[in-house]
């Protein structure tokens, strides 16, 4: 069915629901579907009044304490500020990389000292151990870190997930069996599977209510005439994994904010739905708050665990805001999910890329193998120009963010394909250390140096990020990225070229506006 919703109708519904008006309510997705709170933000739509971080990084003093928190649209202030774990302190938004150790010493259970990582067997990594200077915070790492080579394969989501999601391109009306199969086919034929992409994820509108007798959720057979088990078999047959969408409410976002009557959520049916997903062979669940209760995330998490089927759990723990992130949340995110959203839905505009980078910039404290911050899906190939698309991909890679694409994989340009399949940049994202990159220097307004610790002694990924409106040169100093003074080798990851050995610093010259120079720097000391 065709799902349409006028801006006035949506505004009235959101106001009645106690949410601020995200008008205009046009969708950037094919088909015209509109998600409510936690859903698609249209161009010119929701803005974060008072919540935009200052250019060049938000100054914080004394361990990331935000008085009153960020004010999102609608004026919902977060409270309590940000609790720094292990005494991480920055001035001017700059956090040293490579040397920040959490207070309390190494915490391992049944493990030893790892080479390039912390060794533990099911031990807690909260409050103590460091991986090359990375505070291991945010909960238990099931299976620990391997003694040599990084994260153990027993961890669900040991590295950020890579895949495709239907919403950004197809929304509600465009989602169907043929589209999903075409994306799975393209993920293989384009070489994306070969560089690490594996998930084919169906967003809202795959379901069609519940069976009146069994109460099991039903598949929309007009969209998926072959049924879900057959579709799962098809995707698995490609050597890929498949994901579905639901909510901790009685309705999905589209069920709440459109005339899509089949959009039922999982509230009250978590055990039935979790077992249904496991029986179908589902590998990934996107669980979107949609005015449900925060307590509902734990209910579904436990229901899924009880099935014994390994399922990656991605949640959106907010409606309009404020967002529930590791630094400010009433629930322990790593204990209910493998990944959590940090901001409103993205759409294909440079301002949106910047907005979500800012939302994620200081949330590194919660990231690590098995639990990741999520600044939302990639818009590469959906309307950004190629320079901006490459910068977008680079920043998601260095922030250890999920690389979940939102474009039509079967109709990519050569440049879009080259961006999404750059193995050297993907390797930065998928590095087993699980370190979320962060700003280490701001040479001037709108010029930033980001650094991410990688496996290996004194090895760093560096992004020289030009957010400004004109080309600029940016210098990275070894002292800023925590490697010894002296000589270090530098490689340009987009040019796939070794640039040579440099002493104490390297300067990237004439970096284009809205662009990133992505480097790998290794000290021989």
Image (cartoon, rainbow, N blue to C red):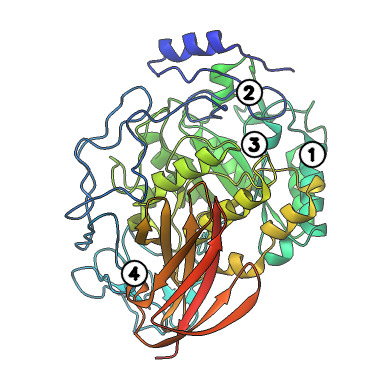
Viewer-nearest of labels 3 and 4? Answer: 4
- Which mark identifies residue 97? 4
| Residue 263 picture location, percent across and down | 61, 24
| Quarter containing the C terminus | bottom left
Local crowd size for mark 4, using a 10 Å CA cut-off: few (<14), some (14–19), many (≥20)? many
Viewer-nearest of labels 1 and 4? Answer: 4
Mark 2 or 4 closer to N-term? Answer: 4
Mark 1 or 4 closer to N-term? Answer: 4
Quadrant in the picture for residue 329:
top left
Q: Which residue is mark 3?
A: 168
Name the residue: 33% across, 48% down: 326
| Residue 201 picture location, percent across and down | 65, 44
| Quarter containing the N terminus | top right
Is 386 or 264 nearer to us in this picture? 386
Mark 3 or 2 closer to N-term? Answer: 3
Q: CA distance from mark 2 to mark 4?
A: 57 Å
Q: Is there CB contact under 8 Å for labels 3 and 4?
A: no
Q: CA distance from mark 3 to mark 2?
A: 34 Å
In the displayed structure, would residue 95 be above or below residue 363? below
Q: CA distance from mark 1 to mark 2?
A: 31 Å
Is 251 or 137 nearer to us in this picture? 137
Q: Is there CB contact under 8 Å for labels 3 and 1?
A: no
Mark 1 or 2 closer to N-term? Answer: 1
Mark 3 or 1 closer to N-term? Answer: 3
| Residue 311 picture location, percent across and down | 55, 52
Q: Which residue is mark 2?
A: 213
Q: Which residue is mark 1?
A: 179
Name the residue: 59% across, 23% down: 254
Quadrant in the picture for residue 139:
bottom left
Local crowd size for mark 2, using a 10 Å CA cut-off: few (<14), some (14–19), many (≥20)? few
Q: Is there CB contact under 8 Å for labels 1 and 2?
A: no
């Amino acid at each position: 069915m065709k799902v349409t919703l006028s801006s006035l109708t949506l505004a009235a519904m959101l106001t009645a629901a106690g949410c601020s008006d995200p008008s205009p309510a046009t969708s950037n997705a094919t088909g015209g579907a509109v998600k409510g709170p936690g859903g698609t933000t249209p161009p010119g739509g929701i803005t974060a009044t008072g919540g935009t971080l200052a250019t060049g990084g938000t100054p914080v003093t004394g361990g990331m304490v935000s008085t009153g928190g960020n004010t999102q649209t609608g004026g919902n202030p977060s409270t309590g500020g940000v609790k720094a774990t292990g005494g991480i302190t920055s001035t001017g938004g700059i956090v040293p990389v490579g040397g920040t150790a959490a207070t309390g010493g190494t915490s391992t259970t049944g493990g030893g000292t790892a080479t390039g990582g912390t060794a533990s067997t099911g031990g807690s990594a909260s409050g103590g151990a460091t991986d090359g200077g990375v505070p291991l915070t945010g909960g238990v790492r099931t299976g620990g870190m391997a003694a040599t080579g990084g994260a153990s394969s027993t961890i669900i989501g040991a590295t950020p997930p890579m895949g495709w999601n239907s919403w950004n391109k197809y929304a509600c009306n465009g989602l169907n069996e043929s589209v999903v199969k075409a994306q799975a086919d393209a993920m293989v034929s384009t070489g994306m599977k070969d560089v690490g992409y594996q998930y084919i994820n169906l967003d809202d509108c795959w379901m069609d209510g519940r069976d009146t007798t069994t109460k099991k959720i039903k598949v929309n057979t007009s969209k998926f005439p072959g049924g879900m088990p057959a579709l799962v078999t098809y995707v698995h047959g490609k050597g890929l994994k498949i994901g579905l969408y639901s909510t901790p409410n009685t309705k999905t976002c589209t069920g709440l904010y459109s005339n899509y009557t089949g959009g039922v959520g999982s509230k009250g049916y978590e055990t039935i739905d979790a077992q249904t997903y496991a029986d179908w062979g589902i590998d990934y669940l996107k669980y979107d708050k949609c005015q449900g209760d925060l307590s509902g995330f734990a209910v579904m998490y436990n229901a899924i665990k009880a099935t014994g089927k390994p399922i990656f759990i991605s949640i959106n723990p907010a409606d309009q805001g404020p967002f529930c992130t590791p630094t400010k949340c009433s629930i322990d995110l790593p204990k209910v999910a493998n990944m959590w959203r940090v901001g409103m839905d993205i759409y294909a505009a440079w301002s949106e890329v910047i907005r979500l980078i800012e939302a994620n910039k200081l949330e590194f404290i919660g990231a690590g193998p098995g639990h990741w911050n999520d600044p939302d899906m990639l818009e590469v190939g959906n309307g950004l120009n190629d320079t901006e698309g490459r910068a977008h991909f680079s920043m998601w890679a260095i922030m250890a963010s999920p690389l979940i694409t939102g474009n039509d994989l079967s109709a990519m340009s050569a440049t879009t394909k080259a961006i999404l399949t750059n193995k050297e940049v993907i390797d930065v994202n998928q590095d087993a250390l699980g370190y979320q990159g962060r700003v280490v220097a701001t040479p001037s307004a709108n010029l930033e140096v980001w650094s991410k610790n990688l496996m290996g002694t004194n090895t760093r990924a560096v992004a020289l990020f030009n957010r400004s409106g004109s080309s600029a040169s940016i210098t990275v100093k070894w002292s800023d990225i925590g490697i010894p003074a002296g000589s270090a080798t530098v490689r340009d990851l987009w040019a796939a070229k070794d640039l040579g050995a440099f002493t104490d610093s390297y300067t990237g010259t004439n970096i284009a506006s809205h662009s990133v120079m992505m480097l790998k720097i290794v000290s021989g000391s």
